[in-house]
Amino acid sequence: WFDMPMHFFFFITWFYIAAALLFPFFRTPSLPRYLRLSILCALLIGVAWEAFELVLFVQFAFPPFHILDSLSDVCFDLAGILLAAYMTLRARV
């Protein structure tokens, strides 16, 4: 369960840095489009990571796989990226 803060802070750091590096080259997208893109990125990366953990579990039975752990990880991914999106848009205004 110690990985929950890691999921949260990983997305804040990753997305905030990516947005800071890319925004000078592109115009800022509208808020609804930006939030959709943020949520899509979090879900794609978060679900892909959880699928990778499931493959590891099937192959090695380590670390133990729990669906609640995977759901909480994806929720923390979403929370982290939404906070990063808010911080990014706030910095742009």
Image (cartoon, rainbow, N blue to C red):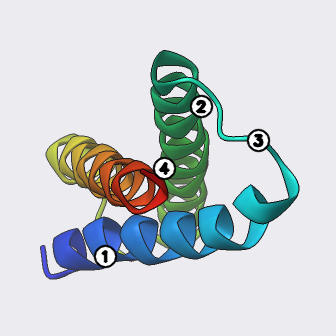
Residue pictured at 15% horizontal, 82% vertical: 2
Q: Which residue is mark 4?
A: 46
Furthest residue in direction top, as rendered: 32
- Using the image, determine if residue 68 lies above or below residue 23: above
Q: Residues within 10 Å of mark 3 (few under 14, many from 20)?
A: few
Tag 1 or tag 4, which sits nearer the N-term?
1
Closest to the camera, between mark 1 and mark 3, is 3
Q: Residues within 10 Å of mark 2 (few under 14, many from 20)?
A: some
In this rendering, position of residue 32 left or right of residue 24 = left
Q: Which residue is mark 1?
A: 9
Of circles 2 and 4, the one toward us is: 2
Element assignment for label 1: helix
* Frontmost residue, 73 versus 84: 84
Q: Amino acid at mark 3?
A: Arg
Q: Nearer the viewer, mark 2 or mark 1?
A: 2
| Comes first in the chain, label 3 or label 4 | 3
Which residue lies under the disc numbered 2? 37
Q: How far apart, in angstroms, are the residues tagged by discs 2 and 3?
A: 15 Å
Disc 4 residue type?
Gly
Question: Residue 19 shows which numbered tag?
Answer: none
- Sequence-wise, the earlier of marks 2 and 1 is 1
* Identity, as a three-letter code, of the amino acid under mark 2: Leu
Which quadrant would the N terminus be assigned to in this image?
A: bottom left
Q: Nearest the camera: 35 or 60?
A: 35
Secondary structure category for the residue under label 4: helix
According to the image, label 3 marks what residue? 27
Find numbered disc 3 in the image and state the secondary structure of the residue it sits on: loop
Labels 2 and 3 touching (C-beta < 8 A) = no
